[in-house]
Image: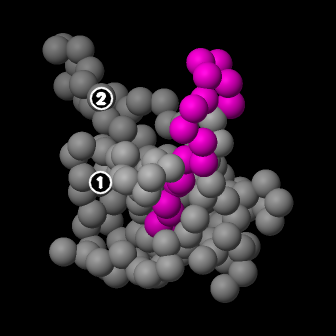
Amino acid sequence: MKIEDVLNKTCLIGLSYINTNGDLLKQAQYAGTVITVDKEEGMTIKLMAIPTDGKAEDKKSKKAETPNFHIPASLDAWFIAPKGHYKNAEHHIDIVDPDYFVTWDVVKKKDDTEEGQQEWWEWHPQSQAPRVN
């Protein structure tokens, strides 16, 4: 697979944030469509619109502004997704038949970062395909 092959494909992204001791800090999920790919700059994912509640008199659901999310260009974290309907209310995920699962560990590299100073994180692709329950 080449990096260009994921352009315009849908993906479900799973991130595990890990501290310098190797402890899990949090996990996050995102879903969207790949809108740009660049071997040097990485990939840009247009995240899915998250429905928000409208006013009481507005019967149609409004969509929130959808941000872009940037991930590294490595394809080592990309796995073909099994067909299915994937929902996660906590992370506002609701996607049917995504093309790929993308899984990364985001590892903090320095504990003592002063207020206002750059925090350093490294992205490590997870080498095993995620399991679906």
Label disc, if present, on residue 52 of the rendered structure: 2
Query: In the depicted view, which residue is nearer to us: 93 or 116?
Result: 116
Query: Which residues fall within the magenta stretch?
Result: 102-118
**What secondary structure is found at the residue carrying circle 2?**
strand
SS at circle 1: strand
Up the image or down, 82 lies above or below 103; here it is below
Residue type at tag 1: Asp
Q: Which disc number belongs to residue 94? A: 1
At a point 42% along the width and 41% down the height, the residue shown is: 49
Residue at (62, 54) in percent of width and height: 122
Q: Quadrant of residue 41?
A: bottom right
Q: Position of residue 77 (x, y in %)?
A: 55, 72
Residue 112's quadrant in the figure? top right
Residue depicted at x 29% and y 54%:
94
CA gap, disc 1 to disc 2?
14 Å
Color scheme of the displayed model: one colour
